[in-house]
Image (cartoon, grey):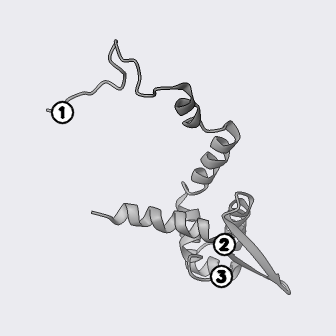
Amino acid sequence: MDKWIEEQCDDNCIGTAEGGDQLRSAKVEEQTAVELAELFKALGDPTRVKMIYALLENELCVHDLCVVLDMAQSAVSHQLRYLRNVRIVKRRKVGKTVYYSLDDDHVKEIFTQTLQHLHHG
């Protein structure tokens, strides 16, 4: 039988922080919280996760992404626009062809570390 643990302090708990400065430093700014939540929201869609995975090692054009994901170009373009808006991917245009890649190494790190977290024993 599982024990139910209340997620609250004991009635006479005085807290663990000695001063208000420590508690203030634990508080994230509202705008930062919103932007971070938006980033995780972007990573919360399986199609976008597949796109990011496909772009981990290679820059790909929209056509290539359509083939990898087995999706229509309009659907791929819609998701790429979303990922661009939250700065997960960037684009490079050569003539009429648009190539996509991850925006920077931070995106790759977040993604690969999350994969490692999922697969560790």
> Are the residues tagged 2 and 1 within 8 Å (C-beta)?
no
Residue under pointer 1:
2
- Give the distance between the C-alpha atoms of the residues marked 1 and 3, in whole angstroms: 49 Å
The single residue placed furthest to the top in the displayed view is 11
Amino acid type, callout 2: Ala
Q: Is residue 59 left or right of residue 113?
A: right
**Is 98 located above or below residue 28 in the figure?**
below
Helix, strand or loop under label 2: loop
* Nearest to viewer (mark 2 / mark 3): 3
- Give the distance between the C-alpha atoms of the residues marked 2 and 1, in whole angstroms: 48 Å
Q: Which mark is residue 72?
A: 2
The single residue placed furthest to the bottom in the displayed view is 95
Find residue 95 and report its horizontal and vertical position in percent. Answer: 86, 87
Amino acid type, callout 3: Glu
At a point 27% along the width and 63% down the height, the residue shown is 121
At a point 56% along the width and 70% down the height, the residue shown is 108
Relative to the observer, which residue lies in front, 27 or 80?
A: 27
Amino acid type, callout 1: Asp
